[in-house]
Each structure stands twice: as structure tokens, then as C-alpha cells.
Amino acid sequence: MAEIFTASRMTRGNFLFPTRIEVSPERVLRVKPRAFGQDEESIAMGKVASVQIKVGLMFSDIRIDSSGGSNPLTSHGHSKTDARRIRELIEKYQQITK
């Protein structure tokens, strides 16, 4: 079962279509809705190399790097607690897959 974290509408680029990050035992998925459709990027849980969180005054930016060298998943405008929870879940699921 995936946990879904939605960026705040008060942040740049998220007003009409906020970015979502879905974390499940199998993968991390970034969904960016558009007027017609959506863009999706995912990294398999076993391929996640690192999770970087930049904490600002109100919101956090998240960067999830893969060990395969592909483009990292990035998202901004998440609450601090959501960003920390995303990192916790990824670390938890990585321990399970090892």
C-alpha cells in the first residue's frame, strides 16, 4: 500500500496541479499533473541511492537519487514532516528489500 504526499498549492509550480510523491515497498513515484494528463517518473526501491531534503522556513525540497545514474526525482513545496516521512519510508523499505 502506497503513502501519498502532495506538495502545497502555495508553492511555485503547484498552484493548479500540485506534485505528488507516492512511496510504496516497490518504488518511489513522482506524479506531476498537467492540464491534459500527467508526467510520471519512478525509481525502484532497490535502486534508490540517496534522499536529500532541503528544509526552508515553511516548505522542503526533496531530491531522490538513483544508483543507476538516471535523473533524480525532485519535488518542492512539501511540508517538513512529509519530507521526513518520505525519507523514513524509503529507508524502511530499503531494509526490507535487502
Image (spheres, grey):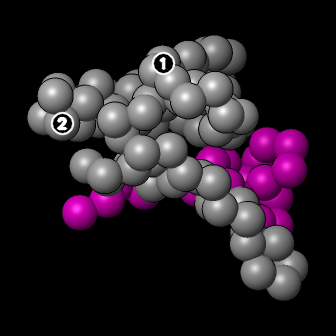
Q: Is residue 63 visible?
A: no
Residue occupied by mark 2: 97
Q: What residue is at 77 percent from the left and 47 percent from the top?
A: 10
Nearest to the observer: residue 77 or residue 42: 42
Find the magenta span and give its range. Answer: 1-21
Q: CA distance from mark 1 to mark 2?
A: 15 Å
Secondary structure type for disc 1? strand
Secondary structure type for disc 2? helix
Q: What residue is at 73 percent from the left and 72 percent from the top?
A: 38
Q: x, y (%) of residue 20?
A: 58, 56
What secondary structure prevails in the magenta region?
loop
Image quadrant in which you'd find residue 90: top left
In the rendered image, the quadrant that contains the N terminus is bottom left
Q: Return the residue found at the far front.
A: 68
Residue occupied by mark 1: 50
Nearest to the observer: residue 51 or residue 53: 51
Q: x, y (%) of residue 33?
A: 73, 69
Q: Which of the marked residues, 1 or 2, is nearer the chain's N terminus? A: 1
Q: Amino acid at mark 2?
A: Thr
Q: Amino acid at mark 1?
A: Ser
Q: x, y (%) of residue 2?
A: 31, 59
Q: Is residue 13 visible?
A: yes
In the displayed structure, would residue 29 be above or below residue 49?
below
In the displayed structure, would residue 5 be above or below residue 55?
below
Numbered-mark total: 2
